[in-house]
């Protein structure tokens, strides 16, 4: 291939190429530099364009004595099936710089093809991304610590006030009044214990014990328990259960029921004593159980959907609960090697749950 004629063909592109901030170099099939822009020249050890033309590309760009190991001229035949082939490579060089190489082939005829390489230093970009991840993790830790402090402070404050009241008035209190204060202490202790238990469940899931169970029956029990625990909230809510009548698979029924109770409870609170419908559709495929839980309680704002599974995040108006309900749902479904996601559209919220069908002797996952 005539290097000089190729160089001349790039003459009119000099100003355009030199305006680019990243190195661009054109190479022929003999690994000779046909054209390079100013950024590529500054990257090399050569200070003149004319001296770089015709030199090996691996020597000009990387000060190598042999062809680069990732060079597509070596990896691909001189007659590629496609007219154009692009390959993107990311690597870290000895200097610590991270770079992205874009290698583009263009087939000219049955014997020749051109080869264009661009190089972009992505070190600063990667550092910014890593810094953003670090800040996000620190923010998540701060939110978690703040949530733990808030959730534990409420019952501890209640216990402190109750004990102060007992200490000051126990000599004049009747037995009924003392019992009432003791019940308040027990209630606050239970709440603090529940917060700690939720945190431990989230942070240390432990070994999941599975046994054959009916997913449909677990859902029905969760509905019955929710209606018993929240009779007033449930009074104007209609329940619709459709799909499979029975799905037997290996599950942890207790933990799975907790998932559905949390999801149903959130839906009831979203209705806030208004009329509505909670729909549960259950389907089975060859390897999966798919459950869709839908309510028409108003939906979830789009800017909050990606936060609802975060620890201690809550959009509840009354600010009750630990903010760990959906986090635990996600953790339990993940333990079951399943998936959970949420979508919200036109005042409807849908939770999509997928659980793998497993039987005794089947490895989890």
Image: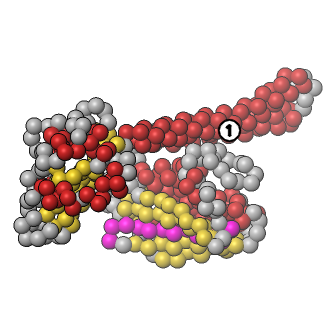
Which residues are drawn in magenta?
286-298
Residue 87 appearing in the image: no
Horizontal side, residue 327 vs residue 106: left or right: right
Q: Name the residue under label 1.
A: 151
Q: Which residue is drawn at 52% across and 53% down?
A: 329
Whether residue 299 is in magenta: the answer is: no
Residue 271, image x and y in percent?
72, 65
Task: In this rendered view, identify the residue nearer to me: 137 or 47.
Answer: 47
Q: Is residue 293 above or below residue 173?
A: below
Residue located at (9% from left, 58% from top): 2
Q: Label 1 neighbourhood size at 10 Å, few (<14), some (14-19), many (20+)? A: many
Predominant secondary structure, magenta span: strand
Q: Is residue 144 left or right of residue 104?
A: right
In front of the other: 74 or 326:
74
- When asked about the image quadrant of residue 76, the answer is bottom left
**28 and 247: which one is in front?**
28
Colouring scheme, one of rainbow, by chain, secondary structure, one colour: secondary structure
The image shows residue 59 at horizontal and vertical percentages of 15, 40
């Amino acid at each position: 291939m005539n290097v000089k004629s190729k160089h001349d063909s790039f003459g009119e592109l000099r100003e355009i190429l030199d305006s680019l901030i990243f190195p661009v170099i054109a190479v022929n099939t003999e690994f000779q530099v046909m054209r390079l822009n100013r950024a590529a020249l500054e990257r090399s050890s050569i200070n003149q364009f004319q001296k770089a033309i015709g030199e090996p590309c691996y020597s000009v760009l990387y000060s190598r004595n042999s062809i680069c190991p990732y060079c597509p001229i070596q990896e691909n035949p001189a007659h590629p099936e496609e007219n154009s082939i692009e390959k993107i490579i990311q690597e870290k060089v000895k200097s610590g710089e991270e770079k992205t190489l874009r290698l583009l082939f263009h087939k000219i005829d049955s014997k020749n093809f051109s080869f264009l390489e661009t190089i972009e230093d992505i070190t600063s970009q990667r550092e910014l991304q890593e810094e953003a991840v670090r800040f996000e993790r620190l923010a998540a830790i701060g939110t978690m610590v703040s949530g733990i402090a808030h959730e534990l402070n409420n019952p501890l404050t209640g216990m402190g006030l109750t004990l102060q009241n007992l200490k000051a008035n126990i000599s004049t209190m009747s037995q009924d009044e003392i019992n009432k204060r003791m019940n308040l202490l027990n209630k606050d202790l239970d709440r603090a214990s529940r917060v700690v238990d939720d945190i431990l469940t989230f942070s240390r899931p432990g070994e999941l014990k599975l046994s054959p169970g009916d997913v449909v029956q677990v859902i029905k029990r969760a509905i019955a328990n929710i209606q018993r625990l929240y009779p007033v909230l449930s009074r104007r809510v209609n329940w619709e259960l459709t799909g499979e009548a029975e799905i037997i698979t290996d599950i942890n029924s207790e933990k799975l029921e907790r998932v559905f109770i949390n999801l149903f409870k959130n839906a009831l609170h979203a209705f806030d004593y208004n009329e509505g419908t909670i729909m549960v559709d259950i389907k089975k495929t060859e390897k999966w159980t798919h459950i869709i839980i839908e309510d028409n309680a108003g939906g979830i704002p789009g800017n909050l959907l990606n936060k609802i599974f975060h620890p201690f995040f809550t959009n509840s108006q009354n600010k009750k609960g630990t903010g760990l309900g959906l986090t635990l749902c996600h953790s339990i479904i993940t333990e079951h090697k399943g998936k959970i996601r949420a979508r919200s559209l036109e005042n409807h919220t849908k939770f999509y749950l997928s659980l793998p069908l497993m039987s005794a002797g089947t490895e989890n996952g």
